[in-house]
Amino acid sequence: MDPLIIALAFFAGIILLLFFGPPLKMMQWTSRGVIKVVIGALLIFFVNVFGAMFGLHIPINLVTSIVVGFLGNFGLGSLVAIHLFILP
């Protein structure tokens, strides 16, 4: 694609956002989801740091971060249980 077309589309999007404003509901949902995923990744990180003494390691990726971020402690517990009992 031509860089001029991309630049024009980018500036047209900016102009539309300046006139009509951003869709606030969608931005709120997106930001809450991103915050939950980041918190999930941090929880997995701390479990990996303290679980290293016991040989526990949960990979930090998008799927595990989403599970822990949206399910909380129950999601973290289920990932630990899966690691301990299902994946020997």
Image: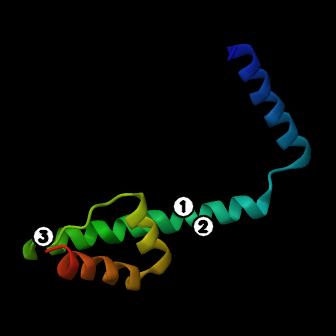
What residue is at 27 percent from the left and 61 percent from the top? 59
Farthest-out residue, right: 19
Residue beneath disc 1: 34
Kind of residue at badge 2:
Arg
> Where is residue 28 shown, x and y percent of the image?
69, 64
Instruction: Between residue 84 and residue 37, name the one nearer to us.
Output: 84
Q: Quadrant of residue 57?
A: bottom left
User: Which label is found at residue 87?
Assistant: none
Could you tell whether 53 is left or right of 42 in the image?
left
Q: Disc 3 to disc 1, how far (Cα)? A: 27 Å
Q: Secondary structure at mark 3?
A: helix
Q: Secondary structure at mark 1?
A: helix
Q: Disc 2 to disc 1, how far (Cα)? A: 6 Å
Residue beneath disc 3: 52
> Where is residue 1 shown, x and y percent of the image?
68, 17
> Where is residue 73 shown, x and y percent of the image?
38, 84
Mark 2 touches mark 1? (CB < 8 Å): yes
Q: Quadrant of residue 48?
A: bottom left
> Where is residue 63 shown, x and y percent of the image?
42, 63
What residue is at 41 percent from the left and 69 percent from the top? 40
Q: Earlier in the sequence, mark 3 or mark 1?
A: 1
Instruction: Between residue 59 and residue 51, name the one nearer to us.
Output: 59
User: Which label is found at residue 32?
Assistant: 2
Could you tell whether 5 is left or right of 33 in the image?
right
Query: Can you say whether 86 is above or below 52 in the image?
Result: below
Mark 1, Cα crowd under 10 Å, few <14 / some 14-19 / many 20+, is: some
